[in-house]
Amino acid sequence: MPPSIHPSRLNASIHGTASAFGPIPDSTGMRRLALSAEDKGVRDWLVTACEELGCEITVDQMGNIFAKRPGTAPSSANVKPIAIGSHLDTQPAGGRYDGILGVLSGLEVLRTLNDHKINTYLPITLVNWTNEEGARFPGAMMSSGVWSQQSSTNLEAAWAVKDTEGMTVKQALIDTGYLGPVPCSYKENELDAHFELHIEQGPLLERASAKIGVVTSVQSMTWYEIRVHGIEGHSGTAPMPTRSDALVTACLLIAAVRDAARDTTLGVATVGVIKSATQSQATIPSDVTFIIDIRASTDALVAQLSTDVFRRFDTIIAHEANSTRYETIRTWSLPESLFDPTLISCVRESALAHCEPSEILDMKSGAGHDSAWTSKVIPTTMIFVPSKDGVSHHPDEYTSPEHCALGAQVLLESVLRYDELVRMSMEDPEPEHEA
Amino acid sequence: MPPSIHPSRLNASIHGTASAFGPIPDSTGMRRLALSAEDKGVRDWLVTACEELGCEITVDQMGNIFAKRPGTAPSSANVKPIAIGSHLDTQPAGGRYDGILGVLSGLEVLRTLNDHKINTYLPITLVNWTNEEGARFPGAMMSSGVWSQQSSTNLEAAWAVKDTEGMTVKQALIDTGYLGPVPCSYKENELDAHFELHIEQGPLLERASAKIGVVTSVQSMTWYEIRVHGIEGHSGTAPMPTRSDALVTACLLIAAVRDAARDTTLGVATVGVIKSATQSQATIPSDVTFIIDIRASTDALVAQLSTDVFRRFDTIIAHEANSTRYETIRTWSLPESLFDPTLISCVRESALAHCEPSEILDMKSGAGHDSAWTSKVIPTTMIFVPSKDGVSHHPDEYTSPEHCALGAQVLLESVLRYDELVRMSMEDPEPEHEA
């Protein structure tokens, strides 16, 4: 019998840290931007909590925190730890579960192992990845991306990213005391595998009355920044036919983004950010910027949908642009990520120990996660638990204590199952030859 | 022969005050928001300059500054001053001429009258109206509106208006020392007539190679704030058909505003301000606000164009809104303003003394001005001079020193012509009866 995690202790750590480090008053919302004072607060708390468990803490050059609980494998075996990772930062008006559940469940797993004096074969490392949200410092999943060395944003580029006040990531790392000495690289700071428990952030589990999502992949995604340029003018004196109105053009393009995704059904496309440099009621806007987020299950589908979007843009510009023009910058992309079959099996078997088969759903992740980057270089998978009404990135984000506890229990058992597989393969590496 | 204004002195006061009070570095742009430190600076400068001319300074409850040069009319005649008014505040990135030219030309008129020891019959009062731009404190032509008592924004409402930092107009008046004791009312602080020299802010004079615009009216204008409400969601997990995307709906509506004005040719319609509460690339926007500015030559045409806009909105919401909804608030309106025929004649005759008839253009003002409000309660007119490329509300706003000087000269002579008409009518009130 595997040990049981402690549901009320998990619940207390979720809501205790939420109340202490970045709560939005009069709501269950959170504002804990990466490397803010609130983020530093919860990081310090996490480090202390892990040290109390006897973990060895290391911090890398991107502020990623690694808390390692030792295993029994002989050091001669040159073993690498099994990671349980997610993030503690939030959106500007986010909730108490996105990312946070994964880290605090990982802590609960370590505590449970300690409570029951369980020795794993491999070390277990809890990871808090820095700036997953990309909300303060643009670039989601920033530090797992650097660690994987598969992101276009390398260490130097990530360090140079600035928030809206002009503060760089590197300076914020220094200021919070989280610019660590360990190289941020999967080659120099190795992990054996990566498990991540996360809320679904969508409605599918709830709609299916399911409790656990077995995540098999993360969809492909690309962001484009579009800058539309027109000419400022006075709203009362410039005749309609002579106008070069950047906002009107931007609006036609944004509607076309929606139309492309709706008409082709290749994937989803969203404009979540729009900014107009002009902010006067009586002025025709000259410079409008917006960001397109395109996602589909494969890289090829993202490319196909992008092509459709930009073909529509060309048509609009040719027929309606009134001498506005636009530039496109592909700011960020995350290729499709396939998770590891062995780890997926560990999750499925662990879930089946607690759920009816109908309560377990195989699913693709629509959202990006740190696991998408780790999956590029080490075996990785994720476990999803239901999000009430599919709501996320919002103070109303909610997952019940029962679902949180179930997720943490499945996480614990998945890690133990995988550890046992590794132990068996290491101790008895070639069983067939001995038969 | 009327006296000549001093072109280089006028030019020096325009560019001297621009450099001293709110210049935008490395440009000829200005940032002199109403009741800011920069605005206080130029106000103090103006008061000193007028006091040096022997003017009596009064400040009303909205911070409007009145600098009165006495006339010769007996006090028994109960005369009211002729006002020369405009404003010294600018847009956040405005130019050196909008409003500023009118006030500093008025100062130049007073200086010229002093230089030549000319006694007018009526007193001449230079007026600096507070917060014409409505850029810091929303509500353009705020204080001339209060003075006229014809605006929906009365004194208490204007005092309560806040800037984005939460500072009220009243507090800003107190802090700058410009909360005066004089009632802000045309009934208690009377003026006989209002002349305003202003840049055209449009391309018509330049295109016609004309030098002076004789302004016969200000078009009717109305602003609507539109708030679109949808439901936030994750850009990666919410399927397209289930979305309630407030930004997509807002974009369809904004395009419809343009279409309505373009298709009907009833007037002009512009969206200059858009704000989305959501500012995350990965979040479907839930709350988008924009402001529509509709203008046409008559109130009836504005109403007709507004009806057309909102009919298009209803069609869009009915067919494409995906359960988004919107609210409309009519935030502000300025009825059509007809200027006074006698004052218009004074301007035309003064212009003809310096220009070929082909260099004078009768025109309607597309922009709102303090004169629009004064015209509701006293005889009013305006003089326009050319704007290079029609550009305004922008650092590139430019009017040549020659056009500025010509405008000031026409202003001076228009005031003297009108003063002479009043003197004649007062000294010889009923000539027909005596004939």
Image (cartoon, coloured by chain):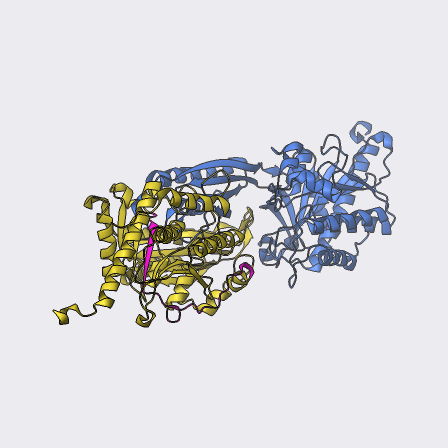
Chain colours: A yellow, B blue
Residue A310 to residue B432: above or below: below
- Residue A195 lies within the magenta run: yes
**Residue A53: % across, % down:** 42, 55
Q: In the image, which residues are magenta?
A: A175-201
Residue A34 versus residue A17: which sits nearer the camera?
Answer: A17
- Residue A368 lies within the magenta run: no
Asked if residue A318 lies left or right of residue A26, the reply is: left
Residue B331 versus residue A362: which sits nearer the camera?
Answer: A362
Quadrant for residue B245, please give it: top left
**Residue A294: % across, % down:** 34, 56
Quadrant for residue B170, please give it: top right
Magenta portion: prevailing SS class: loop
Q: Quadrant of the C terminus of chain B?
A: top right
Furthest-top residue in view?
B433
Residue A162 versus residue B347: which sits nearer the camera?
Answer: A162
Visible residue check, residue B367: yes
Asked if residue B146 lies left or right of residue A104, the reply is: right
Asked if residue B377 lies left or right of residue A390, the reply is: right
Quadrant for residue B397, please give it: bottom right
**Residue B284: % across, % down:** 39, 48
Visible residue check, residue B265: no
**Residue B415: % across, % down:** 76, 44
